[in-house]
Amino acid sequence: MKMEVFAMERAMSTWENLVDYDISESGVKPVCLRDLVEMGFDLEKMMDEPLGYSQANGTIQLREILAQQYPGAGIDNIEVTNGTSEANYVLAITLLGQGDEFALAIPNYMQLEGVAKAVGAKVNKFSLQHDKNWQIDWGEFESAVNPNTRLVYITRPSNPTGSILSEASVERILKRCEEMDAYLISDEVYIGSEIDVARTKTCWGMSDKVIVTSGLSKAYGIPGIRIGWLVGPEKLVAECWSQHDYITIGPNILSDALARVAVTAENREKLYARTCQAIKSNLPVYRQWIKEFDGLLEFNEPAAGAFCFIKYHSDVPSQKISEKIIAEQSTLIAPGSHFGMEGFLRLWLGGEPDFIKRGLGRVSRVLKTIMRKE
């Protein structure tokens, strides 16, 4: 299976630890081990725990706690993975093959486009429309999801737009999936990062064709322990476990133990509140920053997620802008092309406000030069 380069992840892994300012991120400033100890993680007990293999699909204790978030789910509906990205990956290689078709909303996290192509599936795209507050172009959707479609992928809340598809939209998507006998992956890793709107309801339980993926990296603010999960029909989850056996086998014992503390109802709410506060503190910074460009920048304010997807008025490709900002200002941003949509930039909302302000100042120096040349 020949994989193409995953442009966004490669750019971030190449530059994020080299630049002075990384404002390309999509989560909040991570919690530290001390925070989880204060939430009840028994570090002293763990010091004497043999560092052997953990349960490959997640310990029963962790899956029991996770199942409480998904009404009607039991432990056999859940597989624990090394991050949400691995959950998405094992689902794609389980469900897709040569000649199948795969549909995804654009802009989006583009991981599964690369996986689908690698296994020989055809990729069909349907647009989220900026001028309609990122609602679906239903004409494109109907064409993209057809009798050959095996799998559809959405992020809800959306990465990179920060929008949230309505339940009515999800119901329409699922009706089409049921008609075409296709599964829907609802990537819900940003649930809990809502800003001034109600908590997004999981799609789990809305249809037998729903699979949910999620993890600790975004709304929880714990990306470094690499814990994610998928929730689906028992038979499908068992098939995914077979794929997992060939990749990483399972999560590590320390990460599983930390996750059991983080995902309890009480601690989950504490972590979500921390995330929302970080995001809210930076929105005024972005409003003021965009005003300074006198209409040359615009954005639909995100309803969730630690990022802004900003439209710029210039013909210069977003990748070229990103490269120029790295070279001249030692600052990393994410170009819209990495999400399948040109003319946009994704910038971070989840850092300390002073850090964000300084990073935006560096971005401004390049953007204003580009705009003046136009």
Image (cartoon, rainbow, N blue to C red):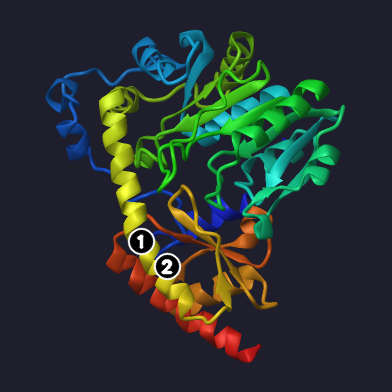
Q: Position of residue 41 (x, y in %)?
A: 20, 26
Locate the C terminus and report the quarter of the image it occupies.
Answer: bottom right
Q: Position of residue 346 (x, y in %)?
A: 53, 61
Residue 20 visible, this orientation: no
Q: Position of residue 240 (x, y in %)?
A: 60, 18
Q: Which mark is residue 282?
A: 1
Vertical placement of residue 314 versus 201, above or below: below
Locate the N terminus and report the quarter of the image it occupies.
Answer: top right
Q: Secondary structure at mark 2?
A: helix
| Disc 1 residue type (three-letter) | Asn
Residue at screen point 41% across, 34% down: 226
Residue 144 falls left or right of residue 237: right
Residue at screen point 73% across, 29% down: 151
Q: Position of residue 371 (x, y in %)?
A: 59, 85
Residue 37 visible, this orientation: yes
Q: Secondary structure at mark 1?
A: helix
Total numbered labels: 2
Q: Which mark is residue 346?
A: none
User: Badges 2 and 1: C-beta atoms under 8 Å apart?
Assistant: yes
Residue 368 falls left or right of residue 320: left
Residue 256 falls left or right of residue 116: left
| Disc 2 residue type (three-letter) | Tyr
Residue at screen point 62% across, 43% down: 111
Q: Neighbour class for label 2 at 10 Å: few (<14), some, many (≥20)?
A: many
**Label 2, on which residue?**
286
